[in-house]
Image (tube, helix red, strand yellow):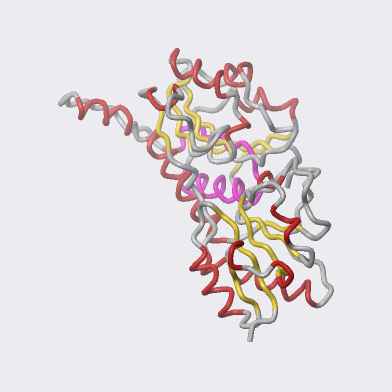
Amino acid sequence: MATETLVFASAVDPIGPWRDTIEAILPDVCVRAPDAAEPGAVRYALIWKPPHGFFARYPALRLVTILGAGADALAGRDDLPDVPITRLSDPEMARMMSHYVLFAVLRYARDIPAFDVAQREARWHYVHPREAREIRVGVLGLGELGGAAAIELARQGFSVRGWARSQKHLPDVACYTGREALDAFLAEIEILVVMLPLTPETRGLLGPGELAALPAGAKLINVARGAIVDEAALVDALASGRLGGATLDVFAREPLDRDHPLWTLPNVLITPHLASVAIPASAARQVADNIVRVRHGLAPLHRIDLARGY
């Protein structure tokens, strides 16, 4: 019989698969939605952007896990409990992200947007394919997800460059480090993939100057957080043709407002923040393992520092 409760709170993730998987691993833990949980029995929380004041209902809470790889879902809040906060670190999430990034890069590398336009106009339009090694792809952020995507792009033969705040060493990826190297990095990139965590240092990192540092006609792919890019500057660069296109999975405000100009720009592809999602079948084991560690007085794995933002 279950003796402890994990409260599950997410507006986008269904509770069923998480409940079934976690309860199968830990039969003495019951997974409940907030309205079905007895507050005094809640010891663990698995959450994504819960409402303000959410945690005050659970005085016996011992562990919080964010349903994702980023910490910004809880950044800037003043209602957090004094318990460990962890993120998910799941190889399947990294694989899913790499698939999306590879799709988006290949779409530009093989000129698919141009063929989409030609098809709508019933126009036979030939563009001679380029070899992958001729195409310079930059990955902005070389953490767990960004590093995996950069390595996969290099494996596919692209000329890959990466930028990170601290020194990184990845196979077949030319790595740049530090703010002073950012403009030089951007100046070489035909297809830029944004994969940074959202922190005070990265918020608004790609402003008008940084976007202008990219070569004319460059493409931008953002699978990180919308607030890393100045959206007004991005709209201007896309509308003027200074940027040749953008694939955007994340936005400063989500859902994207219906009247936002990004919806109607012909050189933009929009997806609703789904490049990578937590998969219960693989990630639930990590949640369960951290519960066991906390029960035994051990520090949970993948703990985050909200002051740093990751």
In the rendered view, tell whether residue 1 sits above or below residue 201. Answer: below
Q: Position of residue 93 (x, y in %)?
A: 54, 56
Which quadrant: the N terminus? bottom right
> Where, by quadrant of the figure, is residue 65 drawn?
bottom right
Q: Which is nearer the eye, 296 or 141? A: 296
In the rendered view, tell whether residue 201 sits above or below residue 77. Answer: above
- Residue most toward the left? 122
Name the residue at 66% across, 41% down.
197
In the rendered view, tell whether residue 66 sits above or below residue 44. Answer: above
Q: Is residue 225 left or right of residue 133?
A: right
Q: Which is nearer the eye, 80 or 288? A: 80
Name the residue at 63% across, 68% down.
37
Q: Position of residue 108 (x, y in %)?
A: 40, 33
Q: Which is nearer the eye, 236 or 12? A: 12
Q: Which is nearer the eye, 175 or 111? A: 111
Q: Position of residue 14 (x, y in %)?
A: 49, 60
Name the residue at 76% across, 56% down.
56
**Is residue 149 in the magenta section?**
yes
> Where, by quadrant of the figure, is residue 31 drawn?
bottom right
**Is residue 242 in the magenta section?**
no
Q: Position of residue 13 (x, y in %)?
A: 51, 57
Numbered range of the magenta stretch? 133-157
In the rendered view, tell whether residue 46 sits above or below residue 99. Answer: below
